[in-house]
Image: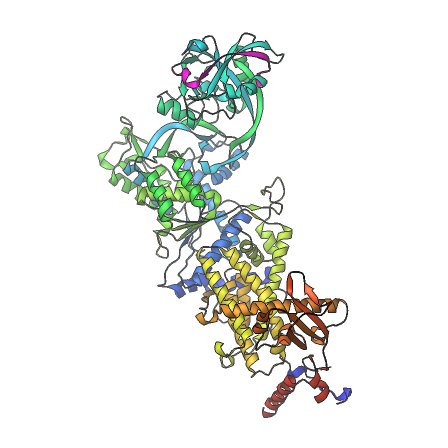
Amino acid sequence: MSADTKRDYKDTVFLPTTDFPMRAGLPQREPEFLAKWTAEDIYGQLRADAKGKTKFVLHDGPPYANGNIHIGHAMNKILKDVIVKSQQMQGKDAPYVPGWDCHGLPIEWKIEEKYRKKKMDKDAVDPVEFRRECREFAAGWIDVQREEFKRLGVFGDWDNPYLTMDFGAEAKIVEELLKFSMSGALYQGSKPVMWSPIEKTALAEAEVEYHDHTSTQIDVAFPFVKAPSADVEGARVVIWTTTPWTMPGNRAVCFGPEIDYAVIEVTKAGEATLAREGDRLIVAEALMVEFVKRAHLDDYLVIARFKGEALAGGLLAHPWRGKGYDFDVPLLPGDHVTTEAGTGFVHTAPGHGDDDYQVAHVKFGIPVPHTVDADGRYYDHVPMLAGEHVYKVADRVCELLTEAGALMAKGVLTHSYPHSWRSKAPLIFRNTPQWFISMEKTGLRDKALKAIREDVSWYPAIAKNRIEAMVADRPDWVISRQRAWGVPITIFVNKATGEILKDEAVNARIIEAVKAGGADAWVAVPAQEFLGNDYNAADFDQVFDILDVWFDSGCTHAFTLEGRDDLAWPADLYFEGSDQHRGWFQSSLLESCGTRGTAPYKGVLTHGFTMDGEGRKMSKSLGNTVAPQTIIDQYGADILRLWAVSVDYQEDVRIGDQIIQGQVDAYRKIRNTLRYLLGNLAGFTEEERLPHAEMPELERFILHRVAELDTLIRSKSAVYEFTPAFTALYQFCIVDLSAFYFDIRKDCLYCDDPASTRRRAARTVLDEVFMRLVTWFAPILSFTAEEVWLSRFGNAAPSVHRQLWPATPAGWADEALAQKWAKVRRLRRVINGALEVDRREKRIGSSLQASATAYVADAAYVDALKGLDLAEITITSAAELKLADAPAGAFRLEDVTDIAVVTGLADGEKCGRCWSVKPEVAEEGDLCHRCGEAVAAHDARNSAA
């Protein structure tokens, strides 16, 4: 046939057909899907679909309702959504009820700022009005955050979230508190607690951050009033502290009974020293050299050595004795005394530290003084320092100690120190009356530890050790705060006895009043109405402290899991950042164990913190914060969702421009894979489907890989490890499908006759892969999966999110076939490597121009290739395998030494339809045998039509 009469075979080739765009346009398309889901009530549809099925309940940890969401919020909500959708698509009823923490300091602080700008005192504002403003502030930010969370593609009951400020929630929190009151676990005590002079309230450990802080460190000498032995007569005990402001609170000095101490005599004082020649000072022997350096002593003699136990019974004088500090200061043994730093003696102020309190007050009965008021100033009764602020008093304390001849050394020390997470100001330990829940009286500690050890699954497993250690060593739970915006501690205390009123009838009236009017009822309703006719309000003090917000959020299980028909108690999972082992996980555990005897959750999963691309903590001052809104506006929420599952979220994770760009590239490859499937499934019908047993080996191998993936994805989903599941999915797309199966089967899909077994098998496999890939990806790429699904099945089709992950037939798994194809793929890789060299050196343009001969010494390769067409697998026009030694110069890969390849140009002419080079083309015209048959069938169908 002459060149000018050759037929154009384009109309006989089955090219991919799809309207699915290559460019995603996610920022523009995603809002369209959000609108569609809202209009269809996708969440309501999911609940109806799953009605009666086994529930899976992930209880949402409530974020604070203040400010736009940050990248940590986004990661948390995305991962929760992935978990919930995965469970739903595995046949569970997986509701998701979002919640917000509405009370507490962060919100109150914002309202106070408004008053401070107006030069107004918050305390002068009517408390009900102040609380109304807090409530409105929280409600406004809930609306903002709700839309931001929805924009991430998170499904949930957004119209009916739980809020800790709802009247019903506040009433339930009150009811839970009163359970502790009735059990005897609630008590008022006066002990040192973390206190913020700026916010004028106690803080829980979870509200504390540790930052570097520069403190004044001092060494102070205490003289003996009563020496326990002749060795220490005339000597002074030297303490070291980094909190000079606590000196007025000193009531004891602790020593280590097993520590070796020394009495040194100053024989030569340096120019900068505060000591005098002849002074005798007692310090731990292990710390003696460091003390001498700090005190600038030029020379000294050690005149006595002894064990700390020899100091038992000794009494010291406060350095300011005779100036209002005329009490004795006992020397007390203490297990907490070490030789890590200082002098080996611990200045003990029982009102300003837990160790100090436990040793001096609890163990030895020393009264706890009240020295510092709520805003950090010394009370008027504190001698010499009345009215001074503890933040600013260090130099004055040093002056007074110097005047008394007690200051031996002064310097500065930068160390990790507790700060308020809200105001960022340093904290103090302050002795104040607070309300506590006992860890021992009702066995709360033991119940919590049993739940941790026996009843809860921890992900990762090491998290169990962390929370177990925290609960085992924690002090009693301080639940009171001296603030306005929160749920009040709704109890009455008998003025005469100091006892808490325990009366179920009174409690019931309080609970009903809060249900009707919210927590404001505690302020608005007269006390006598709560007390009824059996008590006189004049005989009781009404408590107006509020509850720690961790108690609020610790009760969410009670008014959410137990309070809603769509949920269940206990939750299957709590999932938050790793800092919540000391926050919400623990407060929920303690609250539930204290009222129900066990944990409110079956499992606890934690994720790490978000860092910038260089691994630094994000902060506004560094300018390295990454706003989720910015990423969504530029790339789309699916890119953020992809990032969340691609990183090892159980550790701290990084995010930055380069990292996001990597996710964009990965997304593009996934999208192209899905687009290829759509294009090559156009027109697929059930009549075309081929049974597994009739498929060629290649198709059965791909279905084996699908079976492997199915097992892995389900097993990883069961333990909430989505990163390895995503990685396997992604590798399947780019390695098994795009670079291997699609590459091989493109010729078949484009050029085989539609009725051929090979093409029917390939299209059947593409359909099976499509149904699984799209539904497996749906929890992760929620928008894209929906777009792909509707692109194939039409815009009126039920959402992909209403589908279940397809069951995979057991017969698909074939390990023997997999091992065989591992060898085939190894052969293909080496041949492809040889062809790449030919392309680079311009010997061929397309692999179809080539022939290849592979040489092996292992007969297993020959066995693996039986029944297979090596040319088809390597996309060459001719290929063979020889069990023989390779000729010199044959191509090898460095990491594959048992295969060698020789390539050349294929014999024959290029087929005008499939472009393979075959001898029969030159003999019979312009088509190879396969294409000739396919075109004849095509023409026959057209003629019949």
Q: Is residue 1 above or below residue 350?
A: below
Tell me residue 377's x, y (percent).
48, 23
Name above or below for residue 387 compared with residue 939. Answer: above
Q: Is residue 854 visible?
A: yes
Q: Is residue 20 visible to us here? A: no
Q: In the rendered image, which quarter is residue 394 located in?
A: top right
> What's the magenta region?
294-313
Residue at (47% x, 25% y) in the render: 338
Compared with residue 861, is residue 647 higher up or lower down, i.e. above or below? above
Check the image and tell me how it is coloured. Answer: rainbow
Q: Considering depth in this image, is 489 or 288 the residue closer to the camera?
A: 288
Q: Is residue 442 left or right of residue 920?
A: left
Residue furthest to the bottom: 944
Question: Would residue 594 appear left or right of 872 to someone viewing this image?
Answer: left
Magenta region includes residue 867 = no
Residue 673 position within the rendered picture, expressed as x and y whole percent measured from the top left: 59, 67
Residue positioned 37% across, 59% down in the render: 55
Image x and y of residue 516, in percent: 33, 46
Q: Quadrant of residue 293?
A: top right
Residue 471 is situated, as x and y percent measured from the top left of the image, at 39, 39
Quarter of the picture holding the N terminus: bottom right
Quadrant for the C terminus, please.
Answer: bottom right
**Which of the pair 198/887 is nearer the observer?**
887
Given residues 358 and 249, the one toward you in this image is: 358
